[in-house]
Image (cartoon, rainbow, N blue to C red):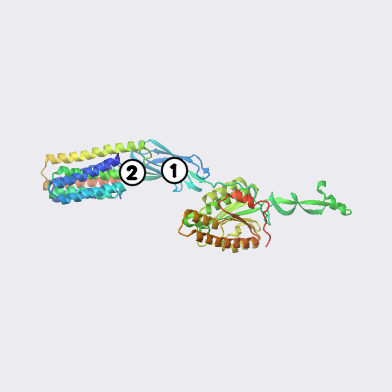
Amino acid sequence: MGRAFVLGPLICIVVLAGLATLHGAILLLSIPLILVWVESLWRAPDPLNLRAQREVSLERVPPQTPVKVKVAIENYGGDLEELQLQDILSPELSIVEGSARHLISLRKGARFEFEYTVTGPRGAFAFERVHAEATDHQGLGRASADLPTSGQLLVFPKLSRVKYVPIRPRRTRVYAGAIPARLGGAGVEFFGVRAYQAGDAPRRINWLISARHDQALYSNEFQQERVADVAIVLDGRERSNLFPGRNSLFEHSILAAGALADALLNQGNHVGLLVYSRYLQWTLPGYGRIQRERILHALSRATPGSSQVFEGLQYLPTRLFPPESQIVIVSPLVEDDYQTLVQLRARGYQVIAVSPDPVTFEERLLLTRGTRIPRREILLAARILRMERQWMLRRLRRAGIQIVEWDVAQPFDQVSRAAFGRSFRFGRPL
Amino acid sequence: MTVIALILSVVVGEASLAWGYAQVGLPHLVRWILAFGALWLAAIWQRWRWFAYIGLTFNFLAAALGLWFLNFAPGWMFAGAIAGLLAWDLTDFRDRLRFSANEMERRAVETRHLMRSAFLALLGFGLAGLAMAVKLQFNFEWAVFLALVAVLGLLQLVSWFRKRS
């Protein structure tokens, strides 16, 4: 409520009452009110002419890293008796030192600087404005402005190190890489034997086979190794990620997607990222460090969401993925995802599903956080759900999809090391 | 400092009004005024800023009522009204003070504000007291004159606001 809108009518009432009753003392009662009013008008702040500058000590940090933010305000207008400054921050950021709010008096031409330290969870945070509100001493006259500033803070997920992700898509790109291309040529691994061709190096001649044939030489062929197209699909649907009490598996999925992207890019692949959430966020495929940055940006901005359209995985835009390429889907998986994943396999994609285990996650939540449901019933329900999930995963494996089950209580690098080790079996063709 | 000043303003305001009413033998109204004071203190504790508006209106109406109907000693009524005004001002100031980041910043703004508020209160009280002491006969001519001054003042205010916007 505007203070002036209370004081004004009160003055009128008192003055009118004094005039109506012809009572001098009542009229005199209005003197203090009028004094306050006049003083406030006299000293009311002019429209603000302030400029703000901001410096953020670090722009790209891992979660919960302290970042110093320095804001300088310069007054190009008149004297300001009481100036409230508030740096508008995302509610997710928390201030660990200093303050983003100040109440000061700022003379004409003066400069005021303040500094504070924030930490935040994964996300992209923009520092776009500083709110300034000047009042006179009575707080009756006000002038406010949002001072534009620039600055952003990107809190990237803290990636665990995955050394190697074995993938074997049917089709590879033309550039040399680390993925066996199922084509004979220059390489390391033995691929086959063919008739000698002019120009073959003598050390490639397979003398054992050549000795068995009269007047014929045979050369060894090695498997070409090339880079592949890889699409990482991050499932951000609320129905598969969110659990009671706003607990979410999504942060774990982000970590897994980031670690996989990092490893696949290090292997030289052409990697893209699709966040399948309230809407589709597609990071175009690319190579190398720049692509790693792009993917990290996308991951830092990713949020879980729900929409009727993307309720199931059936609207996965497969046209974005090159035919017969590799798809890595990071999802807790729900029952009706089975159909979509099998269809992907049927279209010739190689599919790896990294699945944070939602049943164990929820079971642990219920058992540790306390609930009215008896422990025995929780365990029984978890057992039934686990059986259903295992049944679905078994069917997916049968369809040639490689499954990496992940109990999120364990670090992803450990799980991935075990899963992508020597025992890793590539999906057989459908 | 502000909280103490705020509580003192409420206590002094309500006590002045209550004392004024008690002097003419209205214990029933005194109890109501004291109860209102207690409620106002509770509102300060609960940080109900809106209550200060009710408090300001209540104090001024109670003071005007006392002056008009019952011809009280005006000093207590003025004290009640001005203390109410101070309390209203300090309630908002206390809220603005939450923006101060550290003790030094807070002290600087607080001291300046309290000194200026105290000066305004004293000035208001002094002017009113002076006018009461002079005891000008307030009649119809005075009323017309004041009404003209008020109209002129309003016109001046309107033009001033237009210039600013």
Label 1: element kind: strand
Give how far apart the Cα atoms at labels 2 and 1 are.
20 Å
Q: Write down the chain letter for disc 1.
A: A
| Percent coordinates x, y for residue A380 in the rendering | 53, 61
Q: Quadrant of the N terminus of chain B?
A: top left
Mark 1 residue type: Ile
Query: Is residue A86 shown to the viewer in this render?
Result: yes
Left or right of residue A87, residue A163 in this image: right
Identified at 48% across, 57% down, the residue is A244
Q: Residue furthest right?
A: A214
Judging by the rendered image, the residue that carries numbered circle 2 is B96
Query: Is residue A137 shown to the viewer in this render?
Result: no
Q: Nearer the viewer, residue B144 or A154?
A: A154
Rate crowding at label 2 as few (under 14), some (14 to 19) or many (20 or more) other CA atoms within 10 Å: some
| Percent coordinates x, y for residue B76 in the rendering | 17, 43
Mark 2 residue type: Arg
Q: Write down the chain letter for disc 2.
A: B
| Percent coordinates x, y for residue A64 in the rendering | 50, 44
Judging by the rendered image, the residue that carries numbered circle 1 is A95
Identified at 46% across, 42% down, the residue is A118
Q: Are marks 2 and 1 in contact (CB under 8 Å)?
A: no
Label 2: element kind: helix
Foreground: disc 2 or disc 1? 1
